[in-house]
Image (tube, rainbow, N blue to C red):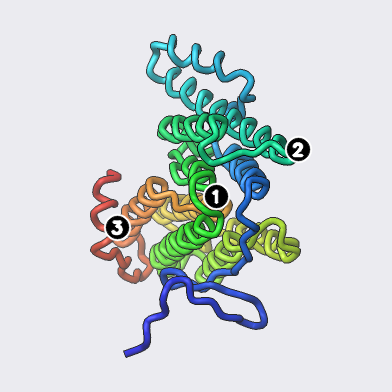
Amino acid sequence: MLKQIPNGDRRDIEGKPYVYYDGYWIKYYEPPADNLEAKKRLIRALTRRLFNHVEHGLNIPGIRLDEARRAYERETDPERKRVAGAMLAGALFNRAADIFTKAVELQEVGVEIVPEDPLLDQCGKCLMEAMKLGHMVRHRSGDEGLDELWGEPLKAFSIPIEAFYESRYLKIAQTMREIDRIADTMVDTLAGIGFFRGIQARIRELAEAAKNKCETLRTDPVIFEVWPTFIVAGERLCRLEPKLPRQASEEQIRLAKQATTLIHNGVSLIQDIARARVPMPKSTCEYLNRCHRFHLAAKKGSRFPHRSLKISTADTAPLTLCR
Protein backbone atom coordinates (compact mmCIF):
# COMPACT_ATOMS: atom_id res chain seq x y z
CA MET A 1 0.00 0.00 0.00
CA LEU A 2 1.16 3.53 -0.76
CA LYS A 3 2.23 5.53 2.27
CA GLN A 4 -0.40 8.11 3.12
CA ILE A 5 0.87 11.68 3.00
CA PRO A 6 -0.09 13.57 6.18
CA ASN A 7 -1.80 16.93 5.96
CA GLY A 8 0.70 19.73 6.43
CA ASP A 9 3.57 17.84 4.81
CA ARG A 10 5.78 20.28 2.92
CA ARG A 11 8.22 19.78 0.06
CA ASP A 12 9.70 21.61 -2.88
CA ILE A 13 8.19 20.81 -6.29
CA GLU A 14 10.14 22.17 -9.26
CA GLY A 15 11.98 24.46 -6.87
CA LYS A 16 8.83 25.95 -5.28
CA PRO A 17 7.47 25.26 -1.78
CA TYR A 18 4.22 23.29 -1.57
CA VAL A 19 2.11 21.94 1.28
CA TYR A 20 -0.16 18.88 1.17
CA TYR A 21 -3.79 18.90 2.29
CA ASP A 22 -6.54 16.36 1.55
CA GLY A 23 -5.12 15.01 -1.68
CA TYR A 24 -3.70 18.22 -3.17
CA TRP A 25 -0.28 19.84 -3.23
CA ILE A 26 -0.89 23.57 -2.73
CA LYS A 27 1.49 26.51 -3.12
CA TYR A 28 2.91 27.36 0.27
CA TYR A 29 3.32 30.91 1.53
CA GLU A 30 5.15 31.73 4.74
CA PRO A 31 2.67 33.26 7.22
CA PRO A 32 3.44 36.76 8.54
CA ALA A 33 4.45 37.41 12.14
CA ASP A 34 1.63 36.94 14.65
CA ASN A 35 1.04 40.46 15.97
CA LEU A 36 -1.71 43.08 15.92
CA GLU A 37 -0.28 44.88 12.88
CA ALA A 38 -0.25 41.67 10.85
CA LYS A 39 -3.78 40.81 11.99
CA LYS A 40 -4.96 44.29 11.03
CA ARG A 41 -3.64 43.85 7.49
CA LEU A 42 -5.12 40.36 7.27
CA ILE A 43 -8.58 41.39 8.49
CA ARG A 44 -8.58 44.36 6.11
CA ALA A 45 -7.65 42.09 3.21
CA LEU A 46 -10.26 39.48 4.12
CA THR A 47 -12.97 42.11 4.49
CA ARG A 48 -12.03 43.61 1.11
CA ARG A 49 -12.12 40.15 -0.46
CA LEU A 50 -15.51 39.48 1.09
CA PHE A 51 -17.08 42.59 -0.43
CA ASN A 52 -15.59 41.69 -3.83
CA HIS A 53 -17.64 38.49 -3.97
CA VAL A 54 -20.99 39.39 -2.43
CA GLU A 55 -23.95 41.28 -3.84
CA HIS A 56 -23.60 45.02 -4.39
CA GLY A 57 -24.45 47.65 -1.79
CA LEU A 58 -23.14 45.92 1.34
CA ASN A 59 -19.91 47.85 1.90
CA ILE A 60 -21.48 50.16 4.49
CA PRO A 61 -18.96 52.31 6.46
CA GLY A 62 -18.67 51.41 10.13
CA ILE A 63 -19.61 54.95 11.11
CA ARG A 64 -23.14 54.23 9.78
CA LEU A 65 -23.60 51.11 11.92
CA ASP A 66 -26.39 52.61 14.06
CA GLU A 67 -28.30 53.68 10.93
CA ALA A 68 -27.95 50.24 9.42
CA ARG A 69 -29.15 48.57 12.62
CA ARG A 70 -32.24 50.82 12.90
CA ALA A 71 -33.13 50.16 9.27
CA TYR A 72 -32.85 46.41 9.82
CA GLU A 73 -34.89 46.44 13.02
CA ARG A 74 -37.79 48.46 11.58
CA GLU A 75 -38.05 46.52 8.30
CA THR A 76 -41.02 44.15 8.17
CA ASP A 77 -41.01 42.93 4.56
CA PRO A 78 -39.09 39.59 4.60
CA GLU A 79 -37.24 40.17 1.32
CA ARG A 80 -36.27 43.74 2.18
CA LYS A 81 -35.26 42.63 5.68
CA ARG A 82 -32.83 40.13 4.19
CA VAL A 83 -31.09 42.90 2.24
CA ALA A 84 -31.15 45.22 5.27
CA GLY A 85 -29.59 42.44 7.35
CA ALA A 86 -26.88 41.98 4.76
CA MET A 87 -26.15 45.72 4.86
CA LEU A 88 -25.97 45.58 8.65
CA ALA A 89 -23.47 42.72 8.39
CA GLY A 90 -21.32 44.86 6.09
CA ALA A 91 -21.40 47.78 8.54
CA LEU A 92 -20.45 45.46 11.41
CA PHE A 93 -17.46 44.14 9.48
CA ASN A 94 -16.25 47.65 8.71
CA ARG A 95 -16.77 48.73 12.34
CA ALA A 96 -14.66 45.79 13.48
CA ALA A 97 -11.93 46.73 11.01
CA ASP A 98 -12.07 50.37 12.21
CA ILE A 99 -11.68 49.30 15.84
CA PHE A 100 -8.79 46.99 15.07
CA THR A 101 -7.03 49.68 13.05
CA LYS A 102 -7.28 52.18 15.91
CA ALA A 103 -6.09 49.57 18.41
CA VAL A 104 -2.99 48.98 16.32
CA GLU A 105 -2.39 52.73 16.01
CA LEU A 106 -2.60 53.08 19.81
CA GLN A 107 -0.14 50.25 20.21
CA GLU A 108 2.25 51.96 17.79
CA VAL A 109 2.39 55.06 20.05
CA GLY A 110 3.12 53.01 23.15
CA VAL A 111 -0.36 52.24 24.51
CA GLU A 112 -0.48 48.62 25.67
CA ILE A 113 -3.31 46.64 24.08
CA VAL A 114 -3.90 43.28 25.77
CA PRO A 115 -6.19 40.55 24.40
CA GLU A 116 -8.78 41.34 27.09
CA ASP A 117 -8.92 45.03 26.13
CA PRO A 118 -12.54 46.33 25.77
CA LEU A 119 -11.72 47.58 22.26
CA LEU A 120 -10.72 44.12 21.10
CA ASP A 121 -13.74 42.64 22.88
CA GLN A 122 -16.04 45.00 20.96
CA CYS A 123 -14.24 44.13 17.72
CA GLY A 124 -14.84 40.43 18.31
CA LYS A 125 -18.53 41.01 19.08
CA CYS A 126 -18.97 42.95 15.83
CA LEU A 127 -17.38 40.16 13.83
CA MET A 128 -19.48 37.53 15.59
CA GLU A 129 -22.74 39.38 14.93
CA ALA A 130 -21.75 39.96 11.29
CA MET A 131 -21.06 36.26 10.85
CA LYS A 132 -24.49 35.38 12.29
CA LEU A 133 -26.10 37.68 9.72
CA GLY A 134 -24.02 36.14 6.95
CA HIS A 135 -26.80 33.72 5.93
CA MET A 136 -28.70 36.75 4.59
CA VAL A 137 -25.92 37.63 2.17
CA ARG A 138 -25.77 36.27 -1.37
CA HIS A 139 -22.91 35.73 -3.74
CA ARG A 140 -22.67 38.33 -6.50
CA SER A 141 -24.20 35.78 -8.88
CA GLY A 142 -27.32 35.74 -6.69
CA ASP A 143 -27.19 31.96 -6.26
CA GLU A 144 -26.13 31.52 -2.65
CA GLY A 145 -24.32 32.94 0.32
CA LEU A 146 -20.68 32.38 1.13
CA ASP A 147 -20.72 31.50 4.81
CA GLU A 148 -17.06 30.54 4.73
CA LEU A 149 -16.02 34.05 3.67
CA TRP A 150 -18.13 35.66 6.39
CA GLY A 151 -16.39 33.57 9.04
CA GLU A 152 -12.83 34.25 7.91
CA PRO A 153 -12.27 37.72 9.47
CA LEU A 154 -13.54 36.42 12.82
CA LYS A 155 -11.27 33.40 12.52
CA ALA A 156 -8.29 35.63 11.68
CA PHE A 157 -9.09 37.77 14.71
CA SER A 158 -9.53 34.93 17.20
CA ILE A 159 -6.79 32.40 16.36
CA PRO A 160 -3.03 32.63 15.68
CA ILE A 161 -2.16 33.66 12.12
CA GLU A 162 -0.30 30.41 11.45
CA ALA A 163 -3.40 28.42 12.44
CA PHE A 164 -5.50 30.63 10.18
CA TYR A 165 -3.21 29.91 7.22
CA GLU A 166 -3.51 26.17 7.91
CA SER A 167 -7.30 26.45 7.83
CA ARG A 168 -7.07 28.27 4.50
CA TYR A 169 -5.02 25.46 2.95
CA LEU A 170 -7.70 22.98 3.98
CA LYS A 171 -10.35 25.19 2.40
CA ILE A 172 -8.32 25.57 -0.80
CA ALA A 173 -8.02 21.77 -1.03
CA GLN A 174 -11.81 21.49 -0.71
CA THR A 175 -12.19 24.16 -3.38
CA MET A 176 -9.87 22.29 -5.74
CA ARG A 177 -11.84 19.10 -5.21
CA GLU A 178 -15.07 20.90 -6.06
CA ILE A 179 -13.51 22.32 -9.24
CA ASP A 180 -12.41 18.82 -10.26
CA ARG A 181 -15.87 17.46 -9.49
CA ILE A 182 -17.54 20.04 -11.73
CA ALA A 183 -15.00 19.49 -14.51
CA ASP A 184 -15.43 15.69 -14.34
CA THR A 185 -19.19 16.07 -14.62
CA MET A 186 -18.87 18.47 -17.56
CA VAL A 187 -16.63 15.98 -19.37
CA ASP A 188 -18.94 13.04 -18.67
CA THR A 189 -21.98 15.06 -19.73
CA LEU A 190 -20.69 16.85 -22.82
CA ALA A 191 -17.67 15.05 -24.28
CA GLY A 192 -19.55 11.95 -25.38
CA ILE A 193 -22.42 13.55 -27.29
CA GLY A 194 -20.30 14.62 -30.25
CA PHE A 195 -21.50 18.24 -30.42
CA PHE A 196 -18.20 19.86 -29.41
CA ARG A 197 -14.84 18.88 -30.86
CA GLY A 198 -11.98 18.99 -28.33
CA ILE A 199 -14.19 19.93 -25.40
CA GLN A 200 -12.58 17.52 -22.94
CA ALA A 201 -9.17 19.14 -23.34
CA ARG A 202 -10.69 22.63 -22.96
CA ILE A 203 -12.53 21.65 -19.78
CA ARG A 204 -9.37 20.16 -18.26
CA GLU A 205 -7.43 23.26 -19.25
CA LEU A 206 -9.91 25.46 -17.39
CA ALA A 207 -9.92 23.22 -14.30
CA GLU A 208 -6.13 23.27 -14.01
CA ALA A 209 -6.01 27.05 -14.53
CA ALA A 210 -8.74 27.52 -11.91
CA LYS A 211 -6.91 25.41 -9.33
CA ASN A 212 -3.72 27.34 -10.04
CA LYS A 213 -5.63 30.58 -9.58
CA CYS A 214 -7.17 29.65 -6.24
CA GLU A 215 -3.81 28.61 -4.74
CA THR A 216 -1.96 31.76 -5.89
CA LEU A 217 -1.94 34.95 -3.83
CA ARG A 218 -2.52 38.19 -5.72
CA THR A 219 0.74 39.53 -4.26
CA ASP A 220 2.72 36.71 -5.92
CA PRO A 221 4.47 38.00 -9.09
CA VAL A 222 3.37 34.85 -10.93
CA ILE A 223 -0.21 36.17 -10.81
CA PHE A 224 0.58 38.03 -14.06
CA GLU A 225 0.84 34.63 -15.73
CA VAL A 226 -1.80 32.78 -13.69
CA TRP A 227 -4.68 35.25 -14.10
CA PRO A 228 -4.50 35.64 -17.93
CA THR A 229 -4.24 31.85 -18.31
CA PHE A 230 -7.30 31.42 -16.11
CA ILE A 231 -9.41 33.99 -17.96
CA VAL A 232 -8.39 32.81 -21.45
CA ALA A 233 -9.13 29.16 -20.58
CA GLY A 234 -12.71 30.12 -19.79
CA GLU A 235 -13.05 32.23 -22.93
CA ARG A 236 -11.74 29.42 -25.14
CA LEU A 237 -14.21 26.95 -23.68
CA CYS A 238 -17.11 29.37 -24.12
CA ARG A 239 -16.16 29.95 -27.77
CA LEU A 240 -16.75 26.32 -28.70
CA GLU A 241 -19.67 25.96 -31.09
CA PRO A 242 -21.70 22.78 -31.56
CA LYS A 243 -21.10 20.75 -34.71
CA LEU A 244 -24.43 19.44 -35.97
CA PRO A 245 -25.25 17.33 -39.05
CA ARG A 246 -26.90 19.11 -41.97
CA GLN A 247 -30.17 17.31 -41.35
CA ALA A 248 -30.15 17.87 -37.60
CA SER A 249 -33.45 17.24 -35.91
CA GLU A 250 -35.23 19.83 -33.79
CA GLU A 251 -34.37 17.72 -30.76
CA GLN A 252 -30.66 17.77 -31.61
CA ILE A 253 -30.74 21.54 -32.13
CA ARG A 254 -32.49 21.98 -28.81
CA LEU A 255 -29.96 19.76 -27.05
CA ALA A 256 -27.07 21.65 -28.65
CA LYS A 257 -28.44 24.94 -27.32
CA GLN A 258 -28.87 23.44 -23.86
CA ALA A 259 -25.34 22.05 -23.98
CA THR A 260 -23.95 25.47 -24.90
CA THR A 261 -25.76 27.00 -21.93
CA LEU A 262 -24.38 24.27 -19.67
CA ILE A 263 -20.85 25.07 -20.84
CA HIS A 264 -21.23 28.79 -20.14
CA ASN A 265 -22.81 28.14 -16.75
CA GLY A 266 -20.08 25.65 -15.84
CA VAL A 267 -17.36 28.13 -16.78
CA SER A 268 -19.00 30.85 -14.66
CA LEU A 269 -19.36 28.50 -11.69
CA ILE A 270 -15.75 27.33 -11.82
CA GLN A 271 -14.56 30.93 -12.13
CA ASP A 272 -16.69 32.07 -9.18
CA ILE A 273 -15.41 29.24 -6.99
CA ALA A 274 -11.77 29.79 -7.95
CA ARG A 275 -11.99 33.55 -7.29
CA ALA A 276 -13.71 33.10 -3.92
CA ARG A 277 -11.34 30.24 -2.99
CA VAL A 278 -14.14 28.47 -1.12
CA PRO A 279 -16.62 25.79 -2.22
CA MET A 280 -20.10 26.86 -3.34
CA PRO A 281 -22.07 23.69 -2.49
CA LYS A 282 -25.56 24.92 -3.35
CA SER A 283 -24.58 26.24 -6.79
CA THR A 284 -22.47 23.15 -7.47
CA CYS A 285 -25.27 20.83 -6.44
CA GLU A 286 -27.76 22.60 -8.71
CA TYR A 287 -25.34 22.57 -11.64
CA LEU A 288 -24.59 18.85 -11.28
CA ASN A 289 -28.31 18.20 -11.15
CA ARG A 290 -28.82 20.12 -14.42
CA CYS A 291 -26.03 18.11 -16.04
CA HIS A 292 -27.67 14.90 -14.91
CA ARG A 293 -31.05 15.94 -16.37
CA PHE A 294 -29.41 16.99 -19.64
CA HIS A 295 -27.58 13.69 -19.86
CA LEU A 296 -30.82 11.75 -19.48
CA ALA A 297 -32.55 13.91 -22.10
CA ALA A 298 -29.63 13.65 -24.54
CA LYS A 299 -29.36 9.90 -24.07
CA LYS A 300 -33.04 9.57 -24.91
CA GLY A 301 -33.38 12.09 -27.74
CA SER A 302 -30.09 12.35 -29.64
CA ARG A 303 -28.72 10.08 -32.36
CA PHE A 304 -25.22 10.49 -31.02
CA PRO A 305 -23.67 7.76 -28.85
CA HIS A 306 -23.41 8.56 -25.17
CA ARG A 307 -21.11 7.56 -22.40
CA SER A 308 -22.77 6.88 -19.08
CA LEU A 309 -22.68 9.89 -16.77
CA LYS A 310 -20.83 8.87 -13.62
CA ILE A 311 -22.89 10.01 -10.62
CA SER A 312 -21.33 8.63 -7.46
CA THR A 313 -23.29 7.64 -4.37
CA ALA A 314 -21.90 10.72 -2.64
CA ASP A 315 -23.35 12.90 -5.41
CA THR A 316 -26.78 11.29 -5.53
CA ALA A 317 -28.14 12.64 -2.22
CA PRO A 318 -27.39 16.33 -2.80
CA LEU A 319 -28.68 16.08 -6.38
CA THR A 320 -32.01 14.82 -5.07
CA LEU A 321 -32.16 17.60 -2.49
CA CYS A 322 -31.65 20.23 -5.18
CA ARG A 323 -34.66 19.22 -7.26
Instruction: Determine the residue positioned at 63% across, 50% down.
Output: 35
Asked which quadrant contains residue 235, the reply is bottom right
> Marks 2 and 3, Cα distance to the nearest angstrom?
67 Å
* Disc on the earlier residue, 1 or 2: 2
As rendered, which of 175 and 101 lies closer to the eye?
Answer: 101
* Disc on the earlier residue, 1 or 3: 1
Instruction: Name the disc covering residue 144, or none.
Output: none
- Position in image of residue 132 (x %, y %): 41, 33
Q: Which residue is mark 3?
A: 296
Q: Is residue 133 left or right of residue 212?
A: left
Q: Which residue is mark 2?
A: 109
Instruction: Determine the residue positioned at 51% across, 65% down.
Output: 196
Instruction: Tell us which disc is closer to us: 1 or 2.
Output: 2
> Marks 1 and 2, Cα distance to the nearest angstrom?
36 Å
SS type, badge 1: helix
Are discs 2 and 3 less than 8 Å apart at CB?
no
Instruction: Tell us which disc is closer to us: 2 or 3.
Output: 2
Q: Amino acid at mark 3?
A: Leu
- Position in image of residue 3 (x %, y %): 37, 86
Q: Residues within 10 Å of mark 2 (few under 14, many from 20)?
A: few
Q: Amino acid at mark 2?
A: Val
As rendered, which of 19 and 241 lies closer to the eye?
Answer: 19
Instruction: Name the disc covering residue 276, or none.
Output: 1
Q: Amino acid at mark 1?
A: Ala
Are discs 1 and 3 less than 8 Å apart at CB?
no
- Position in image of residue 33 (x %, y %): 64, 57
Instruction: Determine the residue positioned at 49% across, 50% down.
Output: 159
